[in-house]
Image (cartoon, rainbow, N blue to C red):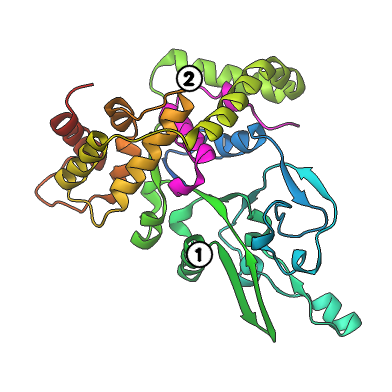
Amino acid sequence: MPAFPFTAIVAQEEMKRALLIAAVDPSVGGVLVFGDRGTGKSTAVRALAALLPKIRAVAGCPYSCSPDSPAEACPHCARGRGKSHQIPVPVVDLPLGATEDRVVGALDLERALTKGEKAFEPGLLARANRGFLYIDEANLLEDHLVDLLLDVAASGVNTVEREGLSLRHPARFVLVGSGNPEEGELRPQLLDRFGLACEVTTPTDIATRIEVVRRRDAYERDGETFCAAQGKAEKALQKTILAARERLGSVSVPDAVLENAARLCLALGTDGLRGELTLMRTARALAALEGADIVSVAHLRQVAPSALRHRLRRNPLDESGSTARVARAVEEVLGAG
């Protein structure tokens, strides 16, 4: 059965916008979605990947290397690039119980035992290259895997030094995590690695709940027909994403917008300058999605909650949540929308 269409997802506008922004500009740094179970988090990730156009990859390459990027040659492509083909954008699940060998790769035991050869068996990071690495219940991920992800996410390269193997291969992916905050907090180091953080909640109005149930039931009864009915909307959104990618490099960010971003981060007391950088990149990607050539304060206002809510220091004197604190700062610094 085809993936549930992205355009058929009801409500959850902030989550959908964040995923589209990450699809337009992966340098934003990935998306973290925290909230109730059964609110469409994993559905949205898989729907977005199915929506994106296929990518060209070197045939037979376990890392899905691009035939147009010889400088980023993996061990396979360094021996010579053959034919290329088109493949769907990879979406790889990182399960909670995954071992380190499964994540980073390890010695191919079958070839070692049968042929006496030392060969590398690629792991999940290899499969996720040029795609999405999805971590459900990211707040429950084991610490040693978190450390691995931080290293690879920062460098875009997976380095394996074990069992007599010494190998490096590309591992650039959009990191998408989800979880339920009631089950534990995310490690600060990993939390900071996500560019955007969204909060999703169970709809409280009857009409929205009914529409969600109606669409899900129609999809499960006849997925082909349901997806075909959304085909026109899906193609239109795909064209919007492609156009935004083309436009992204020409979208300008005025100094006044950068000043507002800096003032907003100062008002919230965010650490470092990653907040301003994320605000700038996110607002620029949103402008590209909307067909604008210049980033405006309105774009900044829209993306501020998802770009900043997870970067705030704890304030024992302020009992309001991070979303409320960002909203208050946005109104004070940028004015009411």
Is 16 magenta? The answer is yes
Q: Nearer the viewer, mark 1 or mark 2?
A: 1
Which residue extends farthest left?
317
Q: Which residue is mark 1?
A: 155
User: What x and y, as percent, mark residue 222?
Assistant: 75, 21
- Whether 283 is drawn above or below 110: the answer is above
Q: How far apart, in angstroms, are the residues tagged by discs 1 and 2? A: 42 Å
- Whether 258 is drawn above or below 190: the answer is above
Q: Residue at x 62, y 52 (%)?
A: 93
Image label count: 2
Q: Is 82 situated left or right of 154 in this image?
A: right
Mark number, residue 209: 2
Q: Nearer the viewer, residue 202 or 292?
A: 292
The boundaries of the magenta stretch are: 1-29
**On the rendered image, what quadrant is the N terminus found in?**
top right
User: What x and y, as percent, mark residue 310?
Assistant: 31, 48
